[in-house]
Image: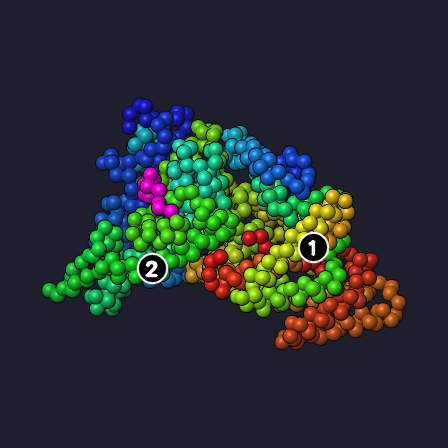
Amino acid sequence: MTAADSPTPNRIVVGIDLGTTNSLAAVVTRHGPRVLRAADGEALLPSVIAFPEDGSTPVVGAEAKARALDLPTRTIHSVKRLLGRSRADVEAEASRLPYPVVPEPERGLARIPIDGRDWSPEELSARVLGAVRARAEAALGMAVEEAVITVPAYFDDAQRQATRHAAELAGLRCLRIVNEPTAASLAYGIDGSHDGTVVVYDLGGGTFDVSVLEIRDGVFKVLATAGDTHLGGDDFDRVIADEILTAAGAHDLVDDAYVKQAIRKSAEALKIELSNAEGAELAIDLGREEQATLRLTRARFEELIAPLVERTIACLRQALRDAERTIDQIDDLVLVGGSTRVPLVRRLVAEATGREPHDGVDPDLAVALGAAIQADILAGGNRNLLLLDVIPLSLGLETMGGVVSKLILRNATIPTSKTEEFSTQIDGQTAVELNIYQGERERTADCRKLASFRLRGIPPMPAGLPRVAVTFMVDADGVLRVHAKEQRTGIAASIQVVPSFGLTQDEVREMMRASIDHAMEDMADREAIELRNKAAAMVHGTRRALELSDLPPDQTYAVKKATNKVDRLLAEADTPADELKRAVDDLSRRTAQIADDVIGSAVHKALTEPREPEAR
Amino acid sequence: MSNPDPFATLGLAPTLDLDLQALEASYLAHSREAHPDRWSDAVRNADDPAILAEALALAASVNDAYRVLKDRWLRAGVLIDRLDADARDATRTLSPLFLAEAMELAESVAEADDDGAPQLRDAIADRVERTFVAVADALREGDARAAATALHQSQYFRKALADLDARCLASGGDR
């Protein structure tokens, strides 16, 4: 690097693209963003860690990748897919990995055992970050201590936290977590000649994101994002691997780590060949002088991966709907990630957007270059750009009956916050537990549980009297922070966060699409649950109110009768919704006049409040 | 609640008939000040977590004010609260006559077939618009309770519209 290429002095903040397959760093120089290359000119560092058998220091990068066949169970790739995940979450893919993945005893988090030591995905990612950092330091000739690190836009809270922890373990101060498609849009739009509505389609080795942005006068505003954190080029390799196994008649060999690594390697090579040629051939050595040949045409390959690519197109349509943009309003299409080299991907995305892909952006380098631009903004080197990003998945609280009440809707610009008031249900209660979920569905069972928050230190008061204001804040990294205060006394309630990763990955993957498919079913379920909740609250509230009220006896009798009827219907699990509704309406009419006087507005509100329709 | 007035946050005159370009310009100007990317190192590296929390709360309030004001219904809600903080709570109980009508509407949405859906959609969209005019008229006359009642009623129509659209989407086809 020449002197003129030197980065802005005083402070070095690098941008790092921590990828499933490859990682790299970039920095902004006086001549714009530049990738930091190895001495041999190579930009991409394979995100692979190999543990030599003699127990010496693990190697990272191309050297590790080269050892995959001779150290099949000790060469770790695609660790990004395990970040912030439990072993149960990754069940489907763990069986295909040549290396073992085991659950950690406490919360079942994914761990990789090597020579009797369990490695966390954070530690392994830290090894990759460390190698990227060493390469950056060699290229710059100075120490690197601060970085901006990119993550898939669709990463949830846990995955973002895990990435931050990996940076910490690598001795890097992570100034910001940036979404990969947003970073790519910065690299694309930095020269100011691309104002308009842009779709960034990012299909990497293991993750998929699509974002719709509006770029104008240096403001990069993300309108909507959608994606799938478990869909990428690895999955294309997998369908080819299945073809190889079939051709070899060797499904029984699938448990052998060496065979798994060999097949994975061959599948990747075939995929790359098929992106440039109409057909490819693979000679498979079956041992004992036997050989099998697999001939794969591009047409067959495309047939195999079409369902996967269709899933990305559905996400793309979802993002456009959420952004309230039509195809006609798209000014440009930017493709990022190595998997966008697959011709079928290019073709289907071009069809779905009515645009030919912009070709001024290198799909392997754009994310790192964009991260470098964000790093420069944070280091104070660029005051002209403003980046407005969003939260990819809604955050909600569990309410009675397993329903998620949304607090923050997906695609809200971050930072964003919501304050809600909670009270107690039992006299003298001093703690409240709140369960927070991320996802789009109505039922807790269909969303991912992020954490339990235990509010403690609430002053003992009669039930319903404490008013605990809980503020849910999503910071600029897309990570949730929570604090709470009791309003009457001003006492800050302490919060204990118990993160949990309880869902399988399939469920997370299904969340978005399913939220559309199941919209009707959810609606009916939710209405039924809400009706029962409302009825139960009314029975309880009315009985309390009757104790306190001095209604004339005839009215008291009528209200009691109506209350008992609702109570009786509630006790029967199979009461038809309309019958319960009639009884609730009847009770509602009879209690209308006492509600305001006696129960107080809070209960009245709970009895009668219609729900806000969800913003779309 | 404790949330600050979004009009005040963005320095805009409170009106339902908001100039959306002015809103956008004000939002971006405030973002350039408050966004975490623009924080000075003094804030970013502050030892006192309260300083960081306050800066974050301000940045969030700018985004949240923009989100609220951009949506005409949420904007109307803010204006009603400004007139009479209790109006929305006090008007939650809608007349049985209206509720019966809303129920009927929800049923027709649930039963709508592909042929009838476009016509039904037009009819509901018309109800939504008329209800908005009712909110606007009431606000103009300073009648917070009437505006709040119409706003509550609008939720049923808007939900019906969203449900109908979700159904059309679920039953296949991109509009």
Q: Which residue is mark 2?
A: A306
* Residue linked to disc 1: B152
Element carrying mark 2:
helix
Estimate the x, y position of residue A284 in percent, counting from the top left: 17, 61
* Residue A358 to residue A137: above or below: below
Q: Residue at point 67% right, 53% down?
A: B130
Examine the image and state in which quarter residue A286 appears. bottom left
Whether the magenta-drawn stretch holds residue A561 is answered as no
Nearest the camera: A615 or A574? A615
Residue at the spot 82% in from the left edge and 65% down from the top edge: A547
Foreground of the two, B45 or B124: B124
Front residue of B84/A239: it is: B84
Percent x, y of residue B168: 52, 62
SS category of the residue bearing label 1:
helix
Which quarter of the picture shows residue B67? top right
- Residue A487 visible in rendering: no
Q: Position of residue B97 (x, y in %)?
A: 74, 64
For residue A157, above or below residue A505: above
Q: How many marks?
A: 2
Residue type, numbered disc 1: His
Q: Which range of residues does the magenta coloring cover?
A: A355-365
